[in-house]
Image: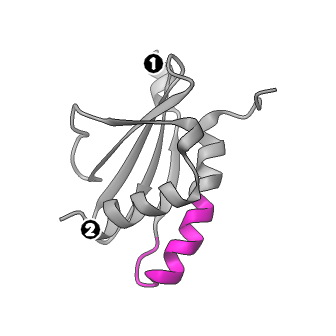
């Protein structure tokens, strides 16, 4: 039976586990994980999960759409820029702590 808790919050919990591992390896970076449900107030059935680095302004954005309950879209960007039009896709089933850790490394460390 599916959880009544919104997917964005369940994914944020998994990202939080990855954050703890990330911070053991990269003690100088403190990722900020956020869930944004404001688009719903504008009539869009979408939530955003963001993982930000305040110092570099790098961001991992995860787009969670009600119309696509089995997958999410993601991209690596900057906190001070609008998201690009293209997002990559991954199934919800494939999302785990390891994937979020890889995204944090790629999006917060390796992204130029």
Stretch of the chain drawn in magenta:
16-30
Measuring 45% from the left and 18% from the top, which residue is drawn there? 44
Q: Residues within 10 Å of mark 1 (few under 14, many from 20)?
A: few
Magenta stretch, main secondary structure, is helix
| First of labels 1, 2 by sequence position | 1
Q: Which residue is mark 2?
A: 110
Measuring 56% from the left and 24% from the top, which residue is drawn there? 69
Q: CA distance from mark 1 to mark 2?
A: 32 Å
> What secondary structure is marked by label 2?
helix
- Give the number of callouts: 2
Give the left or right position of residue 58, taking residue 62 as reference: left
Residue 1 horizontal/vertical position (percent):
82, 26
Measuring 66% from the left and 44% from the top, which residue is drawn there? 10
Q: Which residue is mark 1?
A: 44
Query: Which of the numbered marks, if any, corresponds to residue 24?
Result: none
Question: Residue lying farthest front?
Answer: 94
Tell me if residue 26 is in the magenta stretch. yes
Give the left or right position of residue 57, taking residue 52 as reference: left
Residue 20 horizontal/vertical position (percent):
59, 72
């Amino acid at each position: 039976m599916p959880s009544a808790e919104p997917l964005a919050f369940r994914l944020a919990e998994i990202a939080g586990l990855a954050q703890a591992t990330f911070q053991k390896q990269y003690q100088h970076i403190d990722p900020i994980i956020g869930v944004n449900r404001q688009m719903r107030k504008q009539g869009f059935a979408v939530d955003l999960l963001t993982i930000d680095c305040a110092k570099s302004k790098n961001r991992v954005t995860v787009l969670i759409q009600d119309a696509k309950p089995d997958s999410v879209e993601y991209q690596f960007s900057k906190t001070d820029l609008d998201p690009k039009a293209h997002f990559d896709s991954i199934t919800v089933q494939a999302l785990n702590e390891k994937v979020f850790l890889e995204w944090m490394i790629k999006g917060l460390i390796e992204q130029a």
